[in-house]
């Protein structure tokens, strides 16, 4: 675009869509052209400097841009943007998932006559070729995902495998925090039985094998519970396997490794360690399937390995064949977040319309050696297009050309997508997408880090913001008088600056209603409890018209903090163990 050509200024939202997520204290934000012909505009104008001008007040570290021309996209990694990371931040929006909407406020200059190209018609799918194909369905994307898709996929998906992904980083932090509150809390997914009971008999009858990482920190215990459940349901000969070996809690401080976040030895935090889990690869799943398991329950494995494992087993792939490992990881990465690739976490009215989102379907991958087709159940809501696939391809990825996985290093810049039918997309993977696996495995270490709590105070009508601000000052004075010892205090104004924090734009008008949110982090529960003891009395000694949040809840809102750090451990120190039904039965007796 020449400097003399007439232009108009628009927001990035007019020519691109975005998705964001998080890893640790960093957020990954992808920017994807609606029309790949506009990719040069993104290259020219969506620079690191331009992004810093939008995110600057909340980004304390570096910003790195990665180019993905194969899909007309850029991928940004913003370091130190989440105030310590999702497991320990006091920010109201903790996940980084809302930062994509901030990215879309970036202004761009477009040629005055710029028009977006019309959507292209679907093209025929590539020939399948000879040989077998398998169908894998994605039942869940995280522990608290919807329950209905599993049964729908079993009923109508003509599946060979049904996969359950449940182990996000924050899920495990929350589980550890619950465990600190109540040591009777099971170490596997509390929804294990609720998810499996409605489908287990049907899956066995249809020959659909289940792969799930609901074993969390106790896959053997989870597998044993499923054996018991099969007995309760009268299911005969259900073979269950547990994949174990990656739990390093008892020895992580003895391995001489350092935290990636600060370079300090893990051993220095020995007294604070409550968990350590390695991201394992697909080997245990492959072994369990080779032993005839109907259900495979794993500890933490890389999410995509829930899909790579069945593919490697069915097609006889060597785990040392990094090209095929990369192929399986790409397919698994697209599938692992369930409905996200079918229009979930995608809709933006007027820009990205998604039909019948309340009935959104979950994806099915039909995989052969020569072709991969993604689809969803006929008649289900949502949509499956190259655009939904592009967002998922870059979701929570750092450098797309060097996506580190336990079984290989994958180059996601060699992936393209083609619409081949309504809600059918072919994944096209170029040769050279895989490199040999790294010598280390990533380990998440949970650390006991005190307590946090929050309260909210509500205002509406004339002067709502002024009364909220006066309440903030009132609370600060009362905190000073009671000598509150807080490691961190945060005041947010919901509807004004709670989501994008200090990067929020200035208000253009006085708000009609405001919620003042107070977050607190302390080293002891007793100090954290002081917050509610100062906020609740505002009902009778605060500002006029002070409304209160959840006063009928009598229990404490204080919760333990389990912060997550990471380190790299030589893979030979993380053995894989597979425990089969027969061994589980012996253990039970």
Image: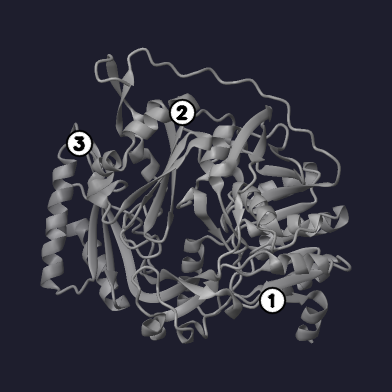
Horizontal and vertical percent for residue 400?
49, 49
Query: Is disc 3 surrounded by few (<14), some (14 to 19) or many (20+) residues within 10 Å?
Result: few
Q: Is residue 158 above or below residue 350?
A: below
Question: Which quadrant of the structure image shows residue 215?
Answer: bottom right
Query: Is disc 1 surrounded by few (<14), some (14 to 19) or many (20+) residues within 10 Å?
Result: many
Which label's residue is closer to the chain start, 3 or 2? Answer: 2
Horizontal and vertical percent for residue 333?
60, 50
How many angstroms separate mark 3 from mark 1 (CA)? 54 Å
Q: Do the numbered discs 3 and 2 sit on residues whose CB atoms are within 8 Å?
A: no
Residue ID at (71%, 31%): 379
How many angstroms separate mark 2 from mark 1 (CA)? 45 Å
Give 52 or 512, whichever is nearer the viewer: 52
Residue 220 tag number: 1
State whether residue 384 appears in this view: no
Residue ID at (55%, 40%): 344
Q: Is residue 487 above or below residue 27?
A: below
**Label 3 sits on residue:** 507
Closer to viewer: mark 3 or mark 1: 1
Which label's residue is closer to the chain start, 3 or 1? Answer: 1
The color scheme shown is one colour
State whether residue 253 appears in this view: yes
Query: Is disc 2 surrounded by few (<14), some (14 to 19) or many (20+) residues within 10 Å?
Result: few
Horizontal and vertical percent for residue 581?
80, 75
Residue 349 tag number: 2
Horizontal and vertical percent for residue 565?
41, 70
Of the 4 image quadrants, the one containing the N terminus is top left
Give 306 or 581, whichever is nearer the viewer: 306
How many angstroms separate mark 3 from mark 2 (CA)? 23 Å
Q: Is residue 520 left or right of residue 483?
A: right
């Amino acid at each position: 675009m020449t400097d003399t050509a007439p232009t108009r200024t628009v927001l990035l939202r007019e020519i691109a869509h975005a998705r964001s997520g998080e890893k640790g204290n960093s957020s990954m934000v992808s920017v994807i052209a609606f029309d790949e012909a506009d990719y040069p505009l993104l290259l020219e104008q969506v620079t690191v400097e331009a992004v810093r001008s939008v995110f600057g007040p909340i980004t304390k570290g570096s910003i790195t841009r990665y180019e993905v021309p194969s899909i007309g996209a850029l991928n940004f990694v913003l370091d130190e943007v989440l105030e310590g990371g999702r497991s320990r931040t006091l920010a109201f929006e903790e996940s980084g998932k809302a930062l994509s909407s901030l990215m879309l406020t970036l202004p761009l200059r477009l040629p005055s006559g710029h028009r977006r190209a019309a959507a292209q018609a679907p093209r025929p799918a590539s020939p399948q070729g000879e040989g077998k194909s398998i169908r894998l369905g994605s039942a869940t994307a995280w522990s608290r995902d919807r329950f209905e898709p599993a049964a729908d996929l079993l009923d109508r998906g003509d599946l060979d495998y049904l996969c359950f992904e449940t182990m996000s980083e924050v899920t495990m932090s929350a589980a550890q925090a619950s465990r600190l509150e109540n040591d009777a809390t099971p170490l596997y997914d509390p929804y294990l039985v609720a998810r499996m009971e409605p489908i287990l008999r049907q899956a066995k009858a249809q020959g659909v094998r289940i792969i799930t990482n609901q074993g969390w920190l106790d896959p053997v215990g989870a597998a044993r519970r499923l054996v018991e459940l099969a007995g309760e349901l009268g299911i005969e000969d259900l073979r269950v396997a547990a994949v174990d070996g990656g739990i390093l809690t008892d020895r992580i401080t003895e391995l001489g490794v350092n935290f990636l976040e600060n370079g300090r030895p893990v051993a220095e935090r020995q007294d604070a360690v409550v968990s350590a889990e390695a991201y394992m690869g697909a080997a245990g799943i492959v072994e369990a399937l080779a032993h005839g398991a109907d259900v495979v329950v794993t500890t933490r494995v890389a999410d995509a390995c829930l899909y790579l494992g069945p593919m490697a087993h069915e097609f006889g792939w060597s785990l040392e064949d990094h090209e095929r490992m990369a192929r399986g990881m790409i397919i698994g990465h697209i599938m692992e977040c369930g409905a996200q690739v079918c229009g979930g976490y995608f809709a933006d009215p007027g820009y990205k319309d998604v039909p019948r989102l309340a009935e959104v379907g979950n994806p099915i991958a039909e995989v052969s050696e020569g072709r991969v087709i993604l689809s969803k159940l006929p008649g289900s809501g949502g949509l499956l297009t190259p655009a939904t696939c592009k967002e998922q391809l870059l979701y929570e990825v750092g450098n797309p050309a060097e996506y580190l996985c336990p079984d290989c290093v994958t180059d996601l810049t060699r992936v393209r997508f083609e619409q081949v039918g309504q809600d059918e997309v072919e994944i096209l993977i170029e040769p050279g997408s895989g490199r040999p696996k790294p010598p280390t495995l990533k380990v998440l270490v949970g650390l006991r880090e005190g307590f946090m709590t929050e309260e909210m105070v509500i205002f509406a009508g004339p002067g709502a913001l002024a009364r909220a601000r006066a309440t903030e000052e009132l609370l600060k004075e009362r905190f000073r008088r009671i000598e509150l010892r807080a490691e961190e205090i945060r005041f947010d104004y919901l509807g004004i600056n709670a989501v994008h924090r200090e990067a929020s734009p200035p208000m253009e008008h006085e708000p009609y209603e405001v919620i003042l949110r107070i977050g607190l982090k302390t080293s002891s529960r007793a100090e954290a409890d002081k917050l509610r003891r100062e906020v609740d009395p505002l009902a009778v000694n605060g500002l006029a018209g002070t409304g209160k949040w959840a006063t009928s809840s009598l229990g404490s809102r204080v919760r333990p903090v389990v912060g997550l750090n990471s380190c790299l451990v030589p893979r030979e120190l993380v053995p894989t163990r597979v425990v089969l039904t027969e061994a589980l039965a012996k253990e039970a007796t």
